[in-house]
Amino acid sequence: MLALTRKKDEALVINNNIEIKIHDIKGDQIKLGVQAPRDISVYRKEIYLQIQEANKEAMSADAASALNDLI
């Protein structure tokens, strides 16, 4: 993991097409702005993990359904 220090209104660039900018800092909260191409999904990590779990459950249900169809 790369750890960087940034101040308000400073940014970092990832892969030449994603920019993450520090918009505001208040206490222990930081407001970030993310500019990325529309074909790149950007999620908060907790939402991303929920999506991954839902996908796993859907795949398991599909696999169970396919097995039942074979029987």
Image: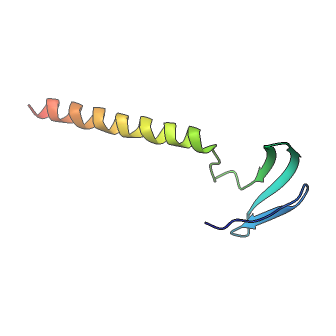
The residue drawn where x is 43% and y is 38% is: 53
Q: Position of residue 32 (x, y in %)?
A: 79, 48
Between 64 and 71, which is closer to the camera in this rendering?
Answer: 64
Q: Splitting the image into 4 quarters, where does residue 31 fall?
A: top right
Q: Quadrant of the C terminus?
A: top left
Query: Outermost residue, left direction?
Result: 71
The residue drawn where x is 91% and y is 56% is: 9
The residue drawn where x is 77% and y is 54% is: 35
The residue drawn where x is 15% and y is 30% is: 68
- From the viewer's perspective, tell me whether residue 27 is left or right of residue 56: right
Q: Is residue 56 above or below residue 18?
A: above
Q: Position of residue 13 (x, y in %)?
A: 76, 66
Query: How is the structure coloured here?
Result: rainbow
Q: Position of residue 24 (x, y in %)?
A: 88, 46
Query: Outermost residue, right direction?
Result: 9
- From the viewer's perspective, tell me whether residue 10 is left or right of residue 60: right
Q: Position of residue 22 (x, y in %)?
A: 84, 53
- From the viewer's perspective, tell me whether residue 25 is left or right of residue 70: right
Q: Splitting the image into 4 quarters, where does residue 27 fall?
A: top right
Q: Is residue 15 above or below residue 32?
A: below
